[in-house]
Image (cartoon, grey):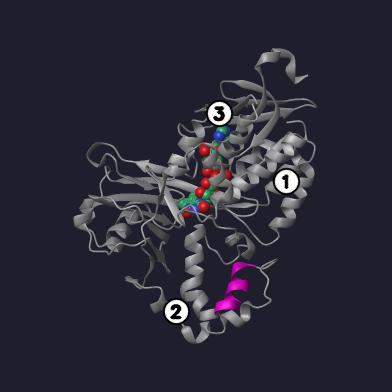
Amino acid sequence: MLKNTFDHSSIRDLIIIGAGVSGLSMAQDAARAGLNTLILEQDARPGGCLHSHRFTGERDGFWLELGAHSAFNSYGHLLALLEAAGELSRLQRRAKVSFRMYADDAVRSIPSQLYFSELWLAPFRLLGSSKTGRSVADYFGHLVGPRNYTAVFEPAFSAVICQPSSEFPADSLFNARPRRKDVPRGFTLAGGLQTIADIFARQPGVNLEFGQTVQEIQHDRDHFLVRTRSDEYLTRSLCLATPVNIADCLLQSPFPALAERLAEISIARVDSVGVAVPKSALTLPPVAGLIGRNQAFYSVVSRDTAPDERYRGFTFHFRPGVLDEASQRDCIARTLNLPRELLTTENVVSKANQLPALRVGNSERIRDIDRMLAGTRLALTGNYFTGVAIEDCVARSRQEWVRLQGEGH
Ligand SMILES: Cc1cc2nc3c(=O)[nH]c(=O)nc-3n(C[C@H](O)[C@H](O)[C@H](O)COP(=O)(O)OP(=O)(O)OC[C@H]3O[C@@H](n4cnc5c(N)ncnc54)[C@H](O)[C@@H]3O)c2cc1C
């Protein structure tokens, strides 16, 4: 039915919507298997949340992370794809600098904020305790004690996931994974983590069309029709690798029951503002970042993990709707102890980011979703399955790729 206006040669094997790390990792497997694959991306660059802003002009060559900043040797699926692309040698070890807290208008060491009298029982409380079915507040609050949780752990976990962390599922926060000993424990690449997306987008057989916002999906027994403002595409299999709220909207008409389950997952927004400043203007010692306690920001992520000769970079991940643009800049100047005039349109960049606000019960929801997906040749990947880390996304894409292969692609 859907096929009428398409000749056979224009029918794709697989269309992937979204060129973030989830969509790009699905495309690596599909391209290597020789599938006629196309990624449709609304933006003008690949990467989604892998977004390293690269300055031009006076600050040419300097970059900072507006999204994800840390990748580790426990990201086995991601590393396997980089290895298959022959690019593992491009990983750069992150400099050893540590996180500090920003609390009560000052930069403080993390140990100075801990209540050790409460903490010494933690190893005993750990014995036999399970994260399954428990929130971060419930599990970690019990483990480290209420004062430590409020003073250090809650702000630190909120900094990690860029959203209030207390109701997040404890088992989605950190996933224990084997580490690769041949890779630096924490790494980046020249040009930032965006370079991973650039590498994946350039692989043979990976076809990408930018500036294509998918607006509608239809399907019949054999095909999916994908419609953007200007074009229509027909494909045998379809993969949605968008944020969960977009997947929900696109599936409402063709897969209403699935869309209903996706709609239960809320979105947390974060206003990320990056600033590049001459080293000489700063007194702050090198840091990996600052964890905000009772601040307008969850965290400040620093470029000191990949030091530059002339500049330092900081990205403030602000709670949404708390400060307007001018007040955000005042806050940046105050926190970094910088003259306000140093923040101009040339050295300040911003991005509206979003992440799923996962809640206890998400794994049951995902099991239902997976049951509904079985046999459909529709794949769903992204950061709303086992966790929000890059590795969670790549692992989900791999799982969905294996399923699609079993279903005839
Ligand atoms: C501020 C921040 C910091 C983070 N830090 C880390 C970190 O240090 N380490 C870590 O492991 N993880 C980190 N994460 C999490 C991780 O980066 C993300 O979960 C992951 O990159 C998400 O990838 P994705 O491909 O699923 O989604 P996205 O990156 O959101 O990509 C989705 C893509 O779909 C496109 N799209 C959306 N709608 C459409 C449409 N209708 N048509 C076509 N294209 C569409 C978007 O433009 C986008 O490119 C961080 C996330 C954020 C926001």
Residues at marks 2 and 3, CA–CA distance in whole angstroms: 49 Å
Q: Name the residue under label 3.
A: 206
Near mark 1 (Cα within 10 A), the count class, few <14, some 14-19 or many ≥20, is some
Disc 2 secondary structure class: loop
Residue 280 vertical position relative to residue 121 in the rendered view, above or below: above
What is the span of residues highlighted in magenta in the rendered image? 135-144
Q: Which amino acid does label 1 sit on?
A: Glu
Near mark 3 (Cα within 10 A), the count class, few <14, some 14-19 or many ≥20, is many
- Identify the residue at image location x=52%, y=75%: 149
Residues at marks 1 and 2, CA–CA distance in whole angstroms: 43 Å
Q: What residue type is labelled 2?
A: Leu
- Identify the residue at image location x=53%, y=63%: 164
- Front residue of this view, candidates 199 and 165: 199
Q: Which quarter of the figure is the C terminus placed in?
A: top right
Q: In this view, does 400 lie to the left or right of 91?
A: right
Q: Which residue lies furthest to the bottom in this view?
A: 117
- Identify the residue at image location x=37%, y=61%: 96
Q: Which amino acid does label 3 sit on?
A: Val
Q: Mark 1 points at which residue?
A: 260
State the image coordinates of residue 156 (x, y, percent, origin top left). Answer: 47, 66
N-term-proximal mark, 1 vs 2? 2
State the image coordinates of residue 398 (x, y, percent, origin top left). Answer: 65, 43
Q: Mark 2 points at which residue?
A: 114
Residue 184 vertical position relative to residue 51 in the rendered view, above or below: below
Q: Does the residue labelled 2 lie within 8 Å of ligand 1?
A: no
